[in-house]
Amino acid sequence: MPFSSLSRLGQEAPLRILLVDAGSGLSVAAAGVVQPWRLAARLLGPQRLQVEVLPLQRVLDGGPGQSARPHLALALADEEYRPLPQPQLRALVECCQRAALWGGVGAAVLWLVQAGAMDGVRTALPWSLYAEAGGSAERAILAPNLFELDGDRLSCCGGAAAIDFSLTLIGAAFGSELQARIKEALCIDRIRPHSDRQRVALQARFGALQPKLSEAVALMEANIEEPLATDDIASLVGISRRQLERQFKQYLGSVPSRYYLELRLQRARQLLLDTSQSIVQVGLMCGFSSGSHFSTAYGALFGITPREERQRRLRPSPDAGGPA
């Protein structure tokens, strides 16, 4: 995930964040974004970070928000989706587009998809809204991950993942020390990476609409230790390899082999973090007969080797002694 743009933004003084809140006041997604950024602003001071939370209605009424152009703008919405008329969608997108980096969290991601603002962009749409997206989803590249940064566009599936999303952005912009202080204040033990998948079965995402895709992923999940060939998966679900690849590209933004590899590596990461199995055992349990192949693939996806991952888990937290 390219964080260089976020690191550069962290050098702005002050960095201006605009959060357009379309929630009802009880949204987990909105709170998961607003609270970490407000804590960051309190710790850094207004000379380094300014955060404005703007109600959606004020945007729709033509309110100016911050007098200065924001560097990062995010639209936040409840977990429950409600449609917005086209004029309101345009006003919301125009407000967000004032920033160098912009996007949505929770149901607001679907608003941006419907407005065409995520066309050709990897997008972390909440799984529960796939059916609502309809034909507009075909223009976006729907990723099953918790959150995405593609070019100047950000998206997060919402819910509790909004906290992981916000802490990741704060860490990229201002460094791990500030991130650790906010984690401690919020009693957060671990930040999930953007590549973690939304924890829900494909059948729940697509229902009866894409049964072959759901069946193919179920086969992958059931055959982690001894991976199946793509041709074998296609044959088992009763479609051609080309049809299978087309469905993976359209609905998961990947090819079957890549999706399968990432699925195995996600499982390996879970075993490294949550069990005492040796690194060799973990590799074998996830279908890697070669230790070097396992290490290379793991490093390419997570930016860290399996050995470093295990050592990081065993290493005491630098902020275990209390707040800075």
Image (tube, rainbow, N blue to C red):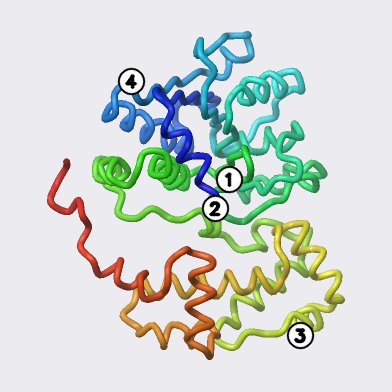
Dot 3 amino acid type = Asp
Residue 276 occupies quadrant? bottom left
* Residue 103 image position (x, y, % from top left): 60, 34
Quadrant of the rendering where the C terminus is positioned = top left
Dot 1 amino acid type = Leu
Residue under pointer 1: 149
Res. 47 mark: 4
Dot 4 amino acid type = Gln
Q: Give the distance between the C-alpha atoms of the residues marked 1 and 4, in whole angstroms.
A: 26 Å
Q: Is residue 208 above or below residue 113?
A: below
Residue at 57% in and 81% down:
224
Dot 2 amino acid type = Met
Q: Give the distance between the C-alpha atoms of the residues marked 2 and 1, in whole angstroms.
A: 7 Å
**Structural crowding at the residue carrying mark 2, measured as other residues with C-alpha within 10 Å and reported as few (<14), some (14–19) or many (≥20):** few
Left/right of residue 297 with respect to residue 278 in the rendered view = right
- Mark 3 or mark 2, which is nearer the start of the sequence? 2
Residue at 27% in and 44% down:
177
Res. 1 mark: 2
- Mark 4 or mark 1, which is nearer the start of the sequence? 4
Res. 232 mark: 3
